[in-house]
Image (cartoon, rainbow, N blue to C red):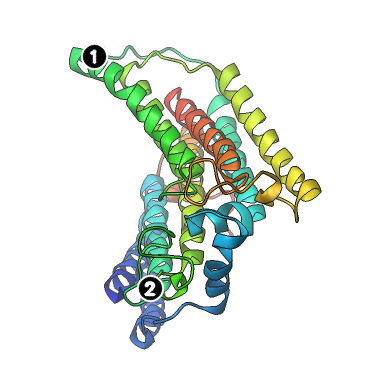
Amino acid sequence: MISILVIGSLLIVVGFWGLLTRKNLIKMVLSIAIAETGLQLVMISIGYIKHGTAPIISGPVTGADAASMVVDPVPQALVLTAIVIGVAVNALLLSYVVSLYRKKKSLDISDFKELKW
Amino acid sequence: MIKKAVSFVVIAIFSLMLFAVIKEWETASRLKPLAREYVTREPAELGASNLVTAIVVTYRGLDTLGEVTVLFLAAAGVGLFLKLRDREKKTPRRNSSEILKTGITFVLPAIIMFGVYIFLNGHLTPGGGFQGGAVIASGVLLLLLTFPDYRPKYGAIHTIESLSGTFYVLAGIAGLVLAGGFLDNRFLPAGNFGQILSAGAIPLIYTFIGLKVGTELTGILSNMKGE
């Protein structure tokens, strides 16, 4: 599961790199989405237990010794909510970009200087 | 140029931090105490096969309620950003192809049914309200792409959304009054372990969550498409 951890960390770095260097607003939103995906992969891989199976009690995984067979369900529950929130936040950011574009007819972040000090 | 260098340094430091985490990382071989407690207590206590569902809906139910609220706020924000504009001239769009139009009549009912299946079986198999709602919304996305002039019935969507949200909170209060605490699922009979009508109120609550998430994502999609 270390590979998932590495891939997730790489995606986080790629996302932050894009966020810092890109000027296009839509590309910045996509960078946030990429970093978010990486973070979700990292969280899932943290919950992995060696030779564990899905945390669902049925078939060979029975109540008595389930605790020694399943992976950690808590990070999975967290990621489940994080994915949905991520979708909603991306939609919100993209519609914000749309309304910014309507104001200035530009997608370049350097054209928005009102709050810059 | 100096900006590029600064961001490169920041990213390098950040990568070093992540690298330190990965280098020291060892895959755990046993559950942490909290997870162990959940896994051993859950089947007798709540009766849901899917432990993730039990955690999302009951043990951490308040978080899920907050999350649904965040989703609602995001949907409202999308509506606010995209609705405040005069409806200028509509660009005529090309009609969809015959294959797409015919195909969707076969596929769409199956997609909606699959979404409902996912959130009804959330306590037994991988799945649940959020996933099922997302599947339903993806069906609506297909509908919106196929028929560019189609407008979902906003009245019906908002009614379903508000009613499912209200009933979700009411189910939580019922748990507070009739069982152990807010969003406790045991105010309904536990049923047989592994049956569709089991795990107390979890299927009921997940149905409300599924409807709410489905209608909210539908609202976001139609707002963004109505742009």
Residue at the farthest right position: B177
Check disc 2: other Cα within 10 Å, few if <14, some if 14-19, many if 20+. some
| Label 2, label 1: how far apart the Cα atoms are | 50 Å
In the foreground, B58 or B8: B58
Q: Could one spot residue B159 in this view of the protein?
A: yes
- Drawn side of residue A45 relative to residue A85, left or right: left
Residue at the farthest bottom position: B24
**Residue B76's spot in the image, x, y percent?**
60, 35
**Residue A109's spot in the image, x, y percent?**
44, 49
Q: Tell me the residue at 48%/18% (across/down).
A: B152
- Badge 2: chain ID: B
Where is residue B163, by image quadrant? top right
Residue at the spot of label 1: B102
**Mark 2 residue type:** Ile
- Drawn side of residue A56 relative to residue B179, left or right: left
**Residue A5's spot in the image, x, y percent?**
34, 72
**Mark 1 residue type:** Thr
Q: Tag 2's secondary structure?
A: helix
Check disc 1: other Cα within 10 Å, few if <14, some if 14-19, many if 20+. few
Q: Could one spot residue A105 in this view of the protein?
A: no
Q: Which mark is residue B11?
A: 2
Q: Which mark is residue B198?
A: none
Q: Earlier in the sequence, mark 2 or mark 1?
A: 2
- Badge 1: chain ID: B
In the foreground, B175 or B144: B175
> Compared with residue B216, is residue A9 higher up or lower down, i.e. above or below?
below
Q: Locate the C terminus of chain B by quadrant.
A: top left
**Residue A63's spot in the image, x, y percent?**
48, 66
Q: Tag 1's secondary structure?
A: helix
Q: Locate the N terminus of chain B by quadrant.
A: bottom left
In the foreground, B210 or A101: B210
Q: Tell me the residue at 44%/70% (across/down).
A: A66
